[in-house]
Amino acid sequence: MEVKNTVSDNSGQQLLTGTKVDSYTTILLYSFQDFLKWWYIKMPIWHLRLLNRLAIVVDDQLSLSLLAKTFFTPWHRDYTAMGFLFGIVMRLLYIPIATSIFLMIFFAYLAVILIWLILPIATITFIITSLIK
């Protein structure tokens, strides 16, 4: 029994006439669309996940959430009035500093994400303006 296949003949040899080859413009258009999808959809999602992980790690390193939860507990479990007072004072001094460090890191990485999104458009704009002048 003979099987008719447009890609191979009866001897199993592949035939190139049965396949369709895309044109260079189609390949270029697909590559451009794939780049835009990667640059503006996949990578921002990756960056936002990394930002979430970065926020968790920085919060863990600075102990912000832990110090906020234990704000009224005494310093080193010293249950005297001085232990309570010293614990509250130390947390009042440390939490604003740690919060400002956390926010600086958070907004710096947000700036990196925004630069990532603007970079191709700015590059094309600068190239076009330099060619026009």
Image: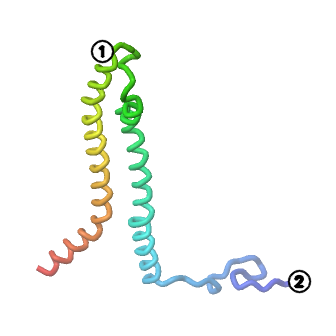
In the rendered image, which quarter is residue 89 located in? top left
Question: For the point 71% across and 77% down, which residue is it?
Answer: 13
Frontmost residue, 68 versus 72: 72
Q: Nearer the viewer, residue 9 or 70?
A: 70
- Mark 2 = which residue? 1
Q: Quadrant of residue 65?
A: top left
The percent position of residue 108, horizontal first and vertical second, equals: 27, 49
x and y, in percent, of residue 35 in the image: 41, 69
Residue located farthest toward the right when viewing the structure as drawn: 1
Rendered position, 90 above or below 37: above
Helix, strand or loop at mark 1: helix
Q: Is residue 65 above or below residue 115?
A: above
Comes first in the chain, label 2 or label 1: 2
Task: Read off the residue under disc 1.
Answer: 82
Give whichever of 126, 25 is nearer the camera. Answer: 126
**Closest to the observer, 54 or 82:** 82
Quarter of the figure that contains the N terminus: bottom right
Which is more foreground, mark 2 or mark 1? Answer: 1
Query: In terms of secondary structure, where does tag 2 sit?
Result: loop
Left or right, 53 with respect to 12, comes to left
